[in-house]
Amino acid sequence: MEKVQAVITGTGRYLPEKILTNHDFEKFLDTSDEWITTRTGIKTRHIADDNQATADLAYYAAENAIKDAGIDKNDIDLIIVSTFTPHMPLPSTACFVQEKLGIAGCGAFDISAACSGFIYGMSIARQFIVGGIYKNILLIGAETMSRFTDYKDRGSCILFGDGAGAIVISAQEQSDKGIIYTKLAADGSGWPLLHIPAGGSHRPASVQTVENREHYIKLKGREIYKFAVQKMQELIEDAMVQNNLSVEDIDMIVPHQVNKRITDSACGHLGFPTEKVFLNISQVGNTSAASIPIALDQAMEEGKVKQGDTILMVAFGAGLTWASAVIKM
Ligand SMILES: CC(C)(COP(=O)(O)OP(=O)(O)OC[C@H]1O[C@@H](n2cnc3c(N)ncnc32)[C@H](O)[C@@H]1OP(=O)(O)O)[C@@H](O)C(=O)NCCC(=O)NCCS
């Protein structure tokens, strides 16, 4: 066991008040509540107000996590925000969050690994803690997906929602708790399956890119579906083997909320009963990097994840990227 453990000492989330239901989509798209529910498990998703953007959602979630951890915000040594829908292209969303918290001085940066971003961030944070560099790290997954969603594309727009989740990761000596395992992976050749074509240096914004709707998420859903079922299953099996865990040893899987059918298929195949898989996708949809920390905070609040539990996180998304983590809460 490492001398210093990276322990999750606080969780928090923020979901904007406005709710978009499947019936709302029926008013402007050729779709139905029945199709969306049976194909994805999603019923509603939260949408940011016009005056809210990613740093605002991130800040509210962060405040809740800091309160839950019971630390002074001035004791935060580093802020990491996982997002692909930043507040602005420059500077990082983490710097905006730091300003809102009023704690100038500590390091602050963003990472981009799409839906796997939160686990990538946890892996980075864990290294800083077990290496003895920092004592308290604020890690946030935050997305304003609605600003990059094409509400004329029925194959993708029904999936996404806005929100933020945050955790405080703290150094604890000789603890039996902590982030005990993370695995990160990617295959860059899969980028065409899920991307935003314009707005970066490759294809800067122009009248033409806007007219072509190139600033919105382009998704090949059917291909991602197959990849996701396979990767979710592989990641869970691998994490169990690497950590010598059986289905009985794992109290809860907290997966990226991508599609209920994907999770049911992968977890069911491995013998996990539904009560060992935390799902809130019906209420929040897919919030990318925010998905896992929102789910974790809700699971803790509902008493479905408790202190001392062993939980397994799995995620996959654009890149393509995929990642897993095992945590003793
Ligand atoms: C997007 C997704 C829900 C589509 O479900 P699916 O069962 O794969 O559906 P398909 O894409 O095969 O489409 C089936 C039919 O439904 C239609 N359809 C697509 N979206 C629809 C909608 N919102 N309402 C009604 N019909 C729709 C398609 O046009 C297609 O019609 P066709 O057979 O006449 O061509 C599913 O593929 C998925 O969840 N993929 C992964 C999601 C993802 O990538 N998330 C982000 C990365 S983490």
Image (tube, rainbow, N blue to C red):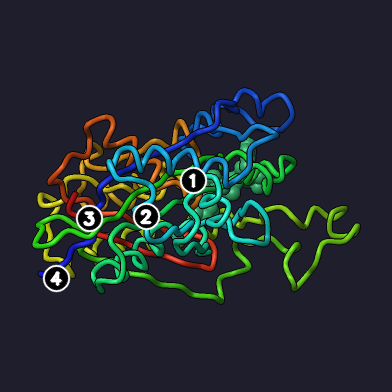
Q: Percent position (x, y) of residue 128?
A: 32, 69
Observer able to see residue 226: no
Query: Tag 1: residue type?
Result: Leu
Query: Tag 3: residue type?
Result: Val
Looking at marks 1 and 2 on the same chain, the residue that comes earlier in the sequence is marked by 2
Closer to us: mark 2 or mark 3?
2
Mark 1 Cβ inside 8 Å of ligand 1: no
Looking at marks 4 and 3 on the same chain, the residue that comes earlier in the sequence is marked by 4
What label sits on residue 2 in the rendered view?
4
> Which structural element holds mark 3?
strand
The local crowd at label 2, few if under 14, some if 14 to 19, many if 20 or more residues have their Cα within 10 Å, is: many
Looking at marks 1 and 3 on the same chain, the residue that comes earlier in the sequence is marked by 3
Query: Tag 4: residue type?
Result: Glu
Report the residue marked by disc 1: 101
Marks 4 and 3 sit apart, C-alpha to C-alpha, by 12 Å
Q: Quadrant of residue 65?
A: top left
Closer to us: mark 4 or mark 2?
2
Report the residue marked by disc 2: 76
Query: Tag 2: residue type?
Result: Ile
What label sits on residue 7 in the rendered view?
3
Q: Do tag 4 and tag 3 residues touch (Cβ < 8 Å)?
A: no
Looking at marks 4 and 1 on the same chain, the residue that comes earlier in the sequence is marked by 4
Residue under the point 29% across and 36% down: 299
Specify whether 93 is left or right of 25.
left
Q: Quadrant of residue 35?
A: top right
Q: Percent position (x, y) of residue 110?
A: 52, 62
The local crowd at label 1, few if under 14, some if 14 to 19, many if 20 or more residues have their Cα within 10 Å, is: some
State which quarter of the image contains the N terminus.
bottom left
Marks 1 and 3 sit apart, C-alpha to C-alpha, by 22 Å
